[in-house]
Image (tube, rainbow, N blue to C red):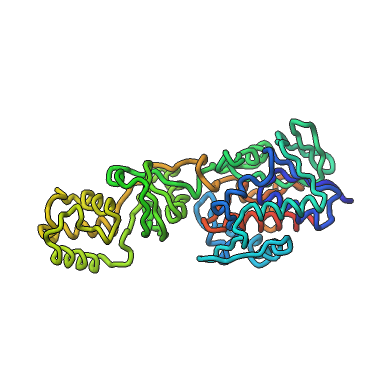
Amino acid sequence: MRGILAIVGGGASGLCAAVRAAESGRFSRVIVLERGPRVGRKLLATGNGRCNLTNRYASPENYRCRTGRHPEFVRPALEAFNVGRVLSFFESLGIVPLEEEDGKIYPRSLQAASVLDVLRFRAEELGVELCCDQEVTGIRPAAEGFVLLTAQGKLRAERVLLAAGGAASPKLGGTDSGCRLLEELGHSITPLLPSIVQLKTELTTIRPLTGIKVDGIVTLTGGDTPVSQTGEILFTDYGISGPPVMQVSCQATRLLEAGGKPVISLDLASEYTKEELFLLLKARAAARPEVLLENFLVGMFHKRVGQTALKAAGIAPLSRKAGSLAPNELNALVSQLKSWKLPVTGTMGLLNAQVTAGGAELSEFDPNTLESRLIPGLYACGEVLDIDGDCGGYNLQWAWSSAMLAIESMI
């Protein structure tokens, strides 16, 4: 018998699931219930509006769950619907992929709107019912399926797929409603935390650097193992941001939640060892002994970065000449530039986060089907589950793979 599939959530995973379900012909109706005024709002913002569709190197090592460890839970979905299959799916919809650095894959148009459009066009072509401003307030198991409660009334469905996303970026439609619906049905929810988010830090030594960008290595310590990322670092009036900061932010968030004291160390001269940098600075001072310290690092670093590093290293006054630098002062400056310590005091929260860490407890879902172990016929995919991935296309890969696995399991 061909029944009704109700998909709660019209984001990336919900739209992907709707297309796959409609193409299968398994259901008499495929209905997407979206609480917002339109589908795919958060998708439009991914990849800075370019939509980082996936990453060539996606593997379980790029994902985390409540424990912070790499979860085997993601393996069945990532293997059954790997990067190649996901790209084939989007190519069938008209997307031409473009691969950039580090395996990041975008639509050739470099427009997130293109990805949303092809999903929406195909869904409408297949007769998928996209019902916006239809928040689901309750799901009740019933004979031969479920009853979904909305402000517009009740809807009966044979199968239900929770694809409601996470609580990150509420201005773009992020919500914890999917987790609340699952909790009402008896599922456990792990704490919802911000992931891929800017970090608040101690500001004393970096306050003058607000608005400056530098390339370097960001290393997070305070946990069992240091975590490092390389890229552009942005100094802000609350702390630091930029791609490498966002990459380590999930580990920082979990350490803070556990009562830990994470510390960020910045290497702003990563192309040099400490010994090499010491010799370089020593030679620099010897070659230009009359240069004032306030200008000593001009040409190597942004002027304000150089001056701030000297002050943070305890070297003063900056009206002194470079020739007066003692070896111990040069060592202190090297340490400052190679390991600029910033205690992490917090994050910019779910309001500013790109992804939600935490969600539906994984042990209560079958990783091979994504069906609830508690309620047969109920499935979940994407960000509503306690899975979050690295920055760089990994979270959208999980959205697509988990959506496809859930639908494949139903048909």
The quadrant of the image that shows the C terminus is bottom right
For residue 84, above or below residue 171 = below
On the image, the x and y values in percent for residue 300 come to: 27, 61
Residue sitting at the far right? 1
Camera-nearest residue between 151 and 192: 151
Residue 322 is left or right of residue 252, and the answer is left
For residue 186, above or below residue 312 = above
Residue 171 is left or right of residue 156, and the answer is left
Camera-nearest residue between 362 and 81: 81
**What residue is drawn where x is 81% and y is 53%?**
126
Give the total number of marks visible in the rendering: 0
Residue sitting at the far left? 324
Q: State which quadrant residue 141 falls in.
A: top right
On the image, the x and y values in percent for residue 135 come to: 70, 36
Q: State which quadrant residue 139 falls in.
A: top right
**What residue is drawn where x is 32% and y is 59%?**
267
Residue 156 is left or right of residue 102, and the answer is right
Residue 305 is left or right of residue 3, and the answer is left
Report if residue 8 is visible in the image. yes
On the image, the x and y values in percent for residue 257 come to: 45, 43
**What residue is drawn where x is 30% and y is 51%?**
341
On the image, the x and y values in percent for residue 25 come to: 84, 56
Report if residue 59 is visible in the image. no
**What residue is drawn where x is 55% and y is 46%?**
356
